Image (spheres, rainbow, N blue to C red):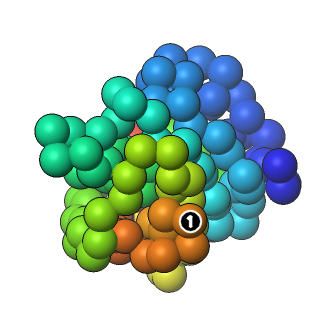
Amino acid sequence: MGVVDPFIVGVLENEPSWRWFGFAIDEATEGRATVSLIVDSGHVNANEVTHGAIVFAVADQAFAMAANTLIPHAATGDAQIHYLAPSRLGQRLEASAVTSWADARRAVVDVTVRADGEAVATYRGMARATRRA
């Protein structure tokens, strides 16, 4: 594991969905994050490819971790995904997020999801500060 912002460590201690999905965090610092997941039998659909919601979830989690390193307690204001190729059972999905723009209350984060090194999706999200921040 690389560098993980202390705020992110605290968030993950209280996030049950993190364990349910089976995510692993590789890094989360200074507007960047990498989150990964090994595709298991509960993640695939009837076509024997990773369900789109799982691909979205790993991208969204990397987005959230990157945004929250800059704006603690940020929430998703908007998100869009483009599916490029399928991924399959047993593959490692890795979502790499990079903040392309941020101010004190908003951040735009771009994410590329790869399966064993091949791009399978791109995602762009905008995070907004919450009243809790």
Q: Is residue 100 visible?
A: yes
The number of discs equals 1
Is 43 above or below relative to 99?
Answer: above
Taking depth in this image into account, of 18 and 78 the one nearest to the observer is 18
- Residue shown at 35%/27% (left/top)? 42
Is 13 above or below relative to 84?
Answer: above
Residue 8 placement (x, y as % from top left): 68, 40
State which quadrant residue 122 falls in: bottom left
Is 39 above or below relative to 103?
Answer: above
Taking depth in this image into account, of 124 and 58 the one nearest to the observer is 58
Residue 62 placement (x, y as % from top left): 52, 54
Is 22 above or below relative to 1?
Answer: above
Residue 50 placement (x, y as % from top left): 31, 48
- Per the image, label 1 sits on a secondary structure element best described as loop
State which quadrant residue 125 falls in: bottom left
Q: Amino acid at mark 1?
A: Asp
- Residue shown at 24%/69% (left/top)? 83
Residue 115 placement (x, y as % from top left): 49, 63
Task: Quickly name the residue at label 1.
Answer: 116
Q: Is residue 36 left or right of residue 121?
A: right
Q: Residues within 10 Å of mark 1 (few under 14, many from 20)?
A: few
Q: Residue furthest bottom?
A: 100
Q: Residue furthest left?
A: 46
